[in-house]
Amino acid sequence: MSSRICIPTISVSTRRRQSDRCDSTLDKRRLAFIAGMIISAVFLVLAFRGLQPDQFWANLSEVDLPLLLFAGLVYFLAVVIIALRWQFLLRAVKLVPLSALAQIVFVGYMGNNVYPLRAGDALRIVLLRRNHAVPLVRSTTVVIIERLFDGSVMLAFILFSLLFIDLQSEPIETITAVTAPLFAIAMLLAFFLAAKPNLLRRIVRTLLRLLPQSMAAPVARLSEDIIAGLKSLRRPAYLVGAVISSFVTWGVEAGTYWLVMFAFGLELNYAVALLLVGAVNLAGLIPASPGQVGVNEFVVITILTALSLPTATATAYAVVTHLVIWLPPTLLGFTLLLRQGMGWSDIRRAQDAEIAAHGFADRT
């Protein structure tokens, strides 16, 4: 597998344009990576300003390690339920065993944690195609639907938790105000297109008349793959399963946050954990570095200090919680990646394969 995946064509000029598109994509990706690192650095400075190191280390020294290990195991359960949700959304395309999906999800988490621009999502899509012959565009559509479900659940968690918490936080208000209409519109559009596949086909047929003949067939195939990826939203059983598993998996992840609170001896209720999970994951829309370093800590510290926790305690909790949800899936994901016969370089190659699929309308 080459590090730059571009589908060859007969025409030399077409091949040159194809290469130029790949080069342009790579340049944009480098710029996005640099921007993400700068954003993370800014948030790290904001998160750790005014920190008193002695108190910070004192808080770390008092943490209950067995509870942290248990919290890590609970997080594993959350990831497995994420795989179950993925299975519900994929069922209309292809039934893939849960054990296989869980392994791919762990590999994807690892990719997102160590490589920029959510490369883990591309890796999941490519592995699903390689191992289970699911076309790239169809699985990509399902992954986008997953993100819409996640955003909606995060908003629900924030709004629900604020019923039980007296919190005045400008960052949380900003996150909610910006993301709520975006996810609402995107979800409504996804359900509308899923419910009206023939309408989408008519729109595509109209657009095809405006396109050159060479582009008509790829665009038509692309639209049919998108329609197929949306099919699970039209099946009540699959849709209900996806909705329930979405709330359960993030509720279990909130349990991880809550267990870390107990490990620090913090007397905070489960609603605070729901708020943290919701806010942290919505803040994940910010294009920061791999693993959302800096952004994660800033959001957690901002919320906990607004709840009158000392800065040193909030900072220690933020760092440890991020480590608990970052390290275990990263180690397991990389182990599973090696078992797939792949390595670090294949993460970037997976991104290139996904880019090629989008550019040339998945020919499977």
Image (spheres, rainbow, N blue to C red):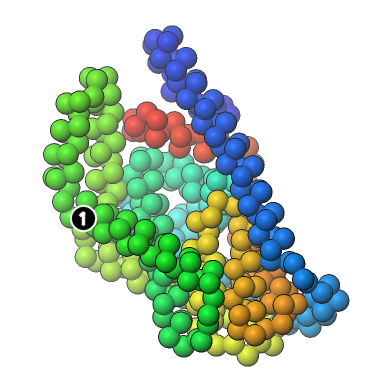
Residue at 21% across, 60% down: 235
Where is residue 200? Give x, y as percent: 18, 43
Residue 150: quadrant of the picture: bottom left
Where is residue 259? Give x, y as percent: 61, 81
Q: Is residue 340 left or right of residue 10?
A: right
Q: Is residue 249 left or right of residue 189?
A: right
Q: Is residue 49 left or right of residue 148?
A: right
Which residue, as the protein is rendered here, is positioned at the far right? 54
Q: Secondary structure at mark 1?
A: helix
Compared with 242, 120 (above or below) is above
Compared with 211, 58 (above or below) is below
Q: Residues within 10 Å of mark 1 (few under 14, many from 20)?
A: some
- The quadrant of the rendering that contains the N terminus is top right
The number of numbered discs placed on residues in the rendered structure image is 1
Where is residue 276? Give x, y as percent: 54, 74
Which residue, as the protein is rendered here, is positioned at the far top? 12
Where is residue 312? Give x, y as percent: 75, 77
Which residue, as the protein is rendered here, is positioned at the far bottom? 267
Residue at 24% across, 66% down: 237
Compare residues 206 and 131 and report the one nearer the observer: 206
Q: Is residue 175 left or right of residue 33?
A: left
Residue at 25% across, 46% down: 228
For label 1, the residue is: 192
Q: Is residue 26 visible?
A: yes
Compare residues 105 and 159 and report the one nearer the observer: 159
Q: Is residue 80 visible?
A: no
Residue at 30% across, 58% down: 185
Residue 46: quadrant of the picture: bottom right
- The quadrant of the rendering that contains the C terminus is top left
Identified by mark 1, the residue type is Phe
